[in-house]
Structure formats: C-alpha cells, structure tokens
Amino acid sequence: MGKGVYLLTVKAEFCASHCLRGYQGACESLHGHNFAVEVSVKGSRLTGDTELLMDFKEIKALLGAVLSRLDHAHVNDVPPFDRQNPSSENLAAFIYEQMRRQLEHTDITVHQVSVSEKDTSKATYYEE
C-alpha cells in the first residue's frame, strides 16, 4: 500500500449569541444561533492495537472542551472575541487553533474546521 492519509471528521454544535461589529445591518444587533461545527483531523499512522487513527470519541471530547467556552455564552464577551469580530470565519480559525494546540504532541493534525450559522452556508478555515 502507498503512503495514504486518513481524514476523520466529527460534528458538534453550540448555542450562543453574538453581534457583528461594523456590519451595518441586522446582524450588528444582538442575535443568536445554533452554530454547527465540523472538525477534520488527519494522519497517516493507525494505532497498532485497534488500527484507528484516533477514536472519534476522543476527537469529540477535545472539540467539546473548546466549544464549552462558547456554548450558551455571548461570544463577544469571550476572548479573543471581546476584541475580534465573532464572525463564522473567525470562530472557525479560533476552533482550529484550539484543536491544533490540543493535538500538537501527537502525529495527528487538524485539517480544517467549518462553522455554520444555518444549513445553507458555512465558513471553513484551514492552513496550507
């Protein structure tokens, strides 16, 4: 077999309010969403015992720890969003960085993070 890469994706959601600073429209006012989050991690080595890249439960637990800071919060009050606009783009980059930090001493890396405010649109962040 060749040198393949495994990509695992989990989904989660959190409920929160936010205001988009400088938006000049309805979204500049306080409003809330059930944000949907997708996180994909990648790696090339499966464990010797179970032949898994990583247990989905572990990925979900790591993501849950990140989202617990945002769930049922007014995101504008949560650093760094007390200074940075809490757009879906910035939320995706924030979650990506938090997940990257949690995985930095493993062979697994974050591939991408997507955040959706509704089913019809999502923002995805990844690094090349």
Image (cartoon, rainbow, N blue to C red):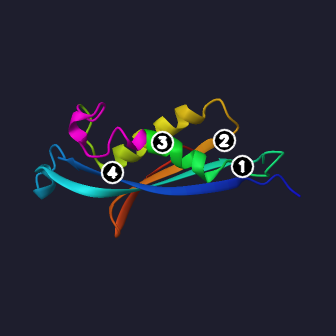
For the residues labelled 4 and 3, the Cα–Cα distance comes to: 12 Å
- Determine the secondary structure under disc 1: loop
Q: Give the mark, 1 or 2, whose residue is nearer the N terminus.
A: 1
- Determine the secondary structure under disc 2: loop
The reply, left or right, for residue 68 in relation to residue 74 is right
Mark 3: few, some, or many residues within 10 Å (few <14, many ≥20)?
many
Judging by the rendered image, the residue that carries numbered circle 4 is 88
Which quadrant, please, contains the C terminus? top right
Camera sees residue 111: no
Pointers 1 and 2 in contact (CB under 8 A)? yes
Camera sees residue 8: yes
The reply, left or right, for residue 36 in relation to residue 83 is right
Judging by the rendered image, the residue that carries numbered circle 1 is 53
**Three-letter amino acid code at the position of disc 2:** Ile
Rendering quarter of residue 80:
top left
For the residues labelled 1 and 4, the Cα–Cα distance comes to: 28 Å
Rendering quarter of residue 110:
top right
Q: Give the mark, 1 or 4, whose residue is nearer the N terminus.
A: 1
Q: Which residues are magenta?
A: 66-82
Instruction: Please tell me whether residue 95 is drawn above or below residue 52 in the rendered image.
Output: above
Report the disc number at residue 108: 2
Q: Residue at x 11, y 52 (%)?
A: 24
Judging by the rendered image, the residue that carries numbered circle 3 is 96
For the residues labelled 3 and 1, the Cα–Cα distance comes to: 19 Å
**Three-letter amino acid code at the position of disc 4:** Ser
